[in-house]
Image (cartoon, rainbow, N blue to C red):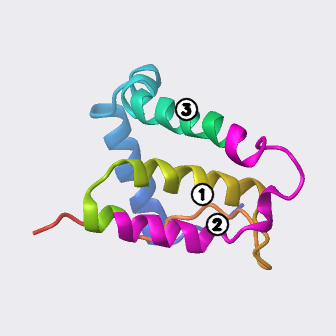
Amino acid sequence: MTNKSVTDHIREHLLASVISSKMPSLEELRETEWSSEFEQRMRNRLIMGAFRYGRFNQPGKGQYDQIASIRRHLIEYECTGNLEHLVDVANLALVEYVFGRHPMRHWHAQDDSEHTKLKG
């Protein structure tokens, strides 16, 4: 038996009440929590990238500095508002996820309590 903190008990209670009273079904969430247009643009860019840079799964795909490229594209998006840069960021993140070489690379899902804030 795990000893739960008061915070854990309160969090479980709040989540259960929100889920039971206000949450849409999983089917509805699968339909609404995604952008098909964004996904299609990502795929289109990946297909064009196969012609320009080689296929996704070919050796050496992870030899580039994806993180620096992500930073550069985010700056370009901030300066220009061109949505193409966000698609490039997503695809670069995908390549980093699959082929990344970060020395501490791992997956550990967690709620760090830091979320996107509203602009005010």
In the depicted structure, whether residue 97 falls above or below residue 51: below
Name the amino acid type tagged 2.
Gln
The quarter of the picture where the C terminus appears is bottom left
Mark 1 touches mark 3? (CB < 8 Å): no
Question: Label 1: how many residues lie within 10 Å, few (<14), some (14-19) or many (20+)?
Answer: some
Could you tell me residue 60's position as x and y percent?
86, 59
Query: In the visual, does 67 lie left or right of 36?
Result: right
Mark 1 or 3, closer to the camera: 3
12 or 81, which lies in front? 81
Q: Which mark is residue 66?
A: 2
- Residue extending furthest left? 120
Which mark's residue is nearer the viewer, 2 or 1?
Answer: 2
Judge whether 6 appears above or below 96 on screen: below
Residue at x 35%, y 52% (from the top left corner) = 14
* Viewer-nearest residue: 104 or 22: 104
Marks 1 and 3 sit apart, C-alpha to C-alpha, by 16 Å
Mark 1 and mark 2 in contact (Cβ < 8 Å)? yes
Mark 1 belongs to which amino acid?
A: Ala
First of labels 3, 2 by sequence position: 3
Residue 44: mark:
3
- Lateral position of residue 32 relative to residue 61, left or right: left
Residue 11 in percent (x, y) is at 41, 59
Residue 97: image location, x then y, percent: 69, 57
Outermost residue, front side: 52
Quarter that holds the N terminus: bottom right
Q: Which residue is identified by label 1?
A: 93
Identity, as a three-letter code, of the amino acid under mark 3: Asn
- Secondary structure at badge 1 equals helix
Q: Is residue 114 left or right of residue 98?
A: left
Please provide percent x and percent y for residue 118. 19, 63
Horizontal side of residue 83 vs 38, given as left or right: left
Image point (60%, 71%), residue name: 67
